[in-house]
């Protein structure tokens, strides 16, 4: 019974202290006289000088390790792309484009030359977009976020259908150059990820091991995701034409990768802080 009494006495002391603080500054007093706590978004962050090691040195270490390991990453991407390109039939092959990023000479990608949509492909895409848009009305209310996501996808594809119906010959993009550019953008994001977490996560007191773990998980995830993601995107355009290029470019590229980084960040923010 003694610990329970101690808890009650501690709570009573805290309540008395908050009432006393509220009495000193009535602007922060609530309806019952209790002190209104400052929102966490307005609190000042305790940032000792030693934490600059977490913000600068930890990302720099992971960045240079990733840069040094790039030949191994290139071999991994080339092996994955070559395996699926040879298994998905003719029309897809492994290629590599040069890059101007210091320390990296080339980036492998899945090369395809997708064609403009045929009438059958256009009508198939149109019916699929309308069916997807109507299907969202059948989902229950608890799946509202999924409904909104599917509606955005359907609206983007319907806009693509409208464009390719009137101005298909004027479409300015090619599948090969787009896949190459998106793969190189993933390479840049891969190298920037430790710095992103360094500025947004390492400022908190979670401890250096957890900060290193978060960056390594995100980096390894992007290393594995990128070749599968864009090889699949290249195959979709090869099989079903450039009609699906806008949807892939807007929702199936960097946005998907940033969403994964945000997910890792949200999970890591739930870890218990040392402070």
Image (cartoon, rainbow, N blue to C red):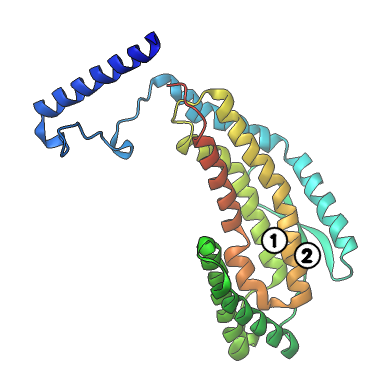
Give the x, y percent position of residue 13: 24, 17
Q: Is residue 49 left or right of residue 36?
A: right
Q: Is residue 63 visible?
A: no
Q: Does the CB distance between marks 2 and 1 fall below 8 Å? A: yes
In terms of depth relative to the viewer, which is nearer, 113 or 245? 245
Say how many tags the image has: 2
Could you tell me which residue is drawn at 49 percent across and 36 percent down?
269
Q: Is residue 204 visible?
A: yes
**Label 1 environment density (alpha carbons within 10 Å; few <14, some 14–19, many ≥20):** many
Q: In the rendered view of the protein, which quadrant contains the N terminus?
A: top left
Q: Is residue 183 left or right of residue 201?
A: right
Which residue was labeled with disc 1?
A: 180
**Label 2 environment density (alpha carbons within 10 Å; few <14, some 14–19, many ≥20):** many
Could you tell me which residue is drawn at 69 percent across and 40 percent down?
220
Residue 143 occupies quadrant? bottom right
**Secondary structure of residue under mark 2:** strand
Residue 24 occupies quadrant? top left
Give the x, y percent position of residue 56: 50, 29
Could you tell me which residue is drawn at 75 percent across and 43 percent down?
73
**Secondary structure of residue under mark 1:** helix
Q: Which numbered disc, 2 or 1, marks the residue that appears first in the sequence?
A: 2
Which residue was labeled with disc 2?
A: 111
Q: Is residue 103 left or right of residue 32?
A: right
In terms of depth relative to the viewer, which is nearer, 107 or 119? 119
């Amino acid at each position: 019974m003694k610990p329970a009494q101690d808890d009650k006495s501690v709570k009573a002391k805290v309540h008395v202290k908050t009432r006393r603080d509220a009495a000193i500054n009535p602007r922060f007093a609530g309806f019952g006289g209790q002190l209104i706590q400052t929102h966490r978004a307005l609190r000042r962050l305790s940032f000792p000088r030693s934490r600059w090691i977490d913000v600068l040195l930890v990302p720099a270490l992971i960045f240079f390790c990733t840069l040094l390991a790039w030949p191994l990453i290139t071999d991994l991407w080339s092996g994955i792309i070559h395996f699926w390109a040879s298994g998905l039939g003719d029309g897809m092959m492994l290629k590599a484009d040069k890059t101007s990023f210091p320390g990296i000479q080339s980036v492998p990608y899945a090369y395809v030359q997708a064609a403009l949509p045929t009438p059958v492909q256009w009508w198939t895409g149109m019916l699929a977009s309308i069916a997807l848009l109507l299907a969202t009305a059948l989902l229950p209310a608890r799946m509202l976020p999924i409904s909104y996501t599917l509606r955005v996808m359907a609206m983007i594809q319907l806009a693509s259908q409208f464009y390719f119906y009137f101005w298909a010959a004027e479409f300015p993009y090619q599948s090969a150059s787009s896949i190459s550019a998106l793969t190189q953008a993933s390479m840049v994001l891969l190298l920037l990820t430790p710095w992103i977490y360094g500025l947004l996560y390492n400022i908190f007191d979670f401890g250096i091991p957890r900060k290193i773990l978060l960056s390594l998980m995100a980096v390894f995830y992007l290393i594995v995701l990128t070749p599968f993601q864009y090889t699949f995107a290249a195959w979709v355009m090869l099989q079903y034409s450039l009609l699906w290029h806008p949807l892939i470019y807007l929702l199936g590229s960097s946005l998907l990768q940033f969403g994964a980084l945000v997910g890792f960040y949200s999970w890591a923010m739930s870890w218990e802080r040392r402070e």
